[in-house]
Image (tube, rainbow, N blue to C red):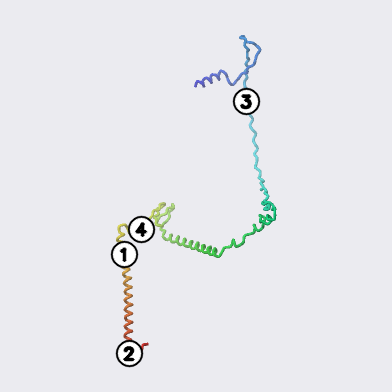
Amino acid sequence: ALAILLYTTISAILQPDTFSLPIDTDRPSEQRTPLIRLIDIIPEDLERPEDPEDLAEIEAGEANAQRPEIGGILLGDLLPPPNNAADRLRPNLVDARLWAAPPPEFFELSLEQREELLLSNRIVAWYDSVSIARAAEDRLTDWTFTDSNGGRWGVADGKIYLGDVALPLPLSFGTPVGRRDIQARRVWEFEEIERQSQRYLIEQTWKERAEAIRARRDRERAAARADTSGIRW
């Protein structure tokens, strides 16, 4: 605060807007010291600079770009000229044998490859038909509908759809907990009945076959007793 006060006081006394130049004078002072005459110079008013001229707008012209022509590299220039007969006989980049077209056998499919392509196409067609059938089957078990807001309601795919929420079905057709032993006992009894019934049918069939064989032998014995000629045909 003291520095600001001193600065304002000195500025009021010295008036920095005007300054003085020391000029020598020939008149001596009373103390035999040279006097300096001071001349006040008032600064002239500064003139306002002229406004800059408006720059003319330059329209972009059409570009006339041309592709530069780059000379190709000759194949013969890639290798130094042959020096001897061996180099002349050795194949180089200008040899037509190095640039010959590949044989057509490289681009033809063998019989096995054609069969594989045919089989893969049939598998793809079969897979598409199975997918369509599966989608139709899923639609048969899709008991849902969609409301005006896009929410899905109903039962499908083993889930309960409640608008935007899908909950898995807690219901199952399995044996409830605590009754598995009873269910297993019932299954064993049913299977045992089935086994015994099959065994009875087999035994009955064997019994009928044994009776048929016994009756046939009895008939043969009766026919043998009736024939007393002793001639066997």
Q: Earlier in the sequence, mark 2 or mark 3?
A: 3
Residue to which mark 3 is pinned = 46
Q: CA distance from mark 2 to mark 3?
A: 172 Å
Nearest to the observer: residue 30 or residue 226: 226
Amino acid at pointer 1: Trp
Q: Residue at x 32, y 84 (%)?
A: 221
Residue to which mark 4 is pinned = 172
Nearest to the observer: residue 154 or residue 189: 189
Q: CA distance from mark 1 to mark 4?
A: 22 Å
Q: Earlier in the sequence, mark 2 or mark 1?
A: 1
Residue 143: percent from left, percent from top: 41, 58
Q: Earlier in the sequence, mark 4 or mark 3?
A: 3
Q: Earlier in the sequence, mark 3 or mark 1?
A: 3
- Considering the image in quadrants, where does the C terminus appear? bottom left
Residue to which mark 1 is pinned = 188
Q: Which mark is residue 228?
A: 2
The number of discs equals 4
| Mark 3 or 1: the one toward you | 1
Amino acid at pointer 4: Ser
Identify the element where label 1 is drawn: helix
| Mark 4 or 3: the one toward you | 4
Q: Earlier in the sequence, mark 1 or mark 4?
A: 4
Compared across the picture, whether 52 is left or right of 124 comes to right
Residue 78: percent from left, percent from top: 66, 51
Compared across the picture, whether 194 is left or right of 45 comes to left
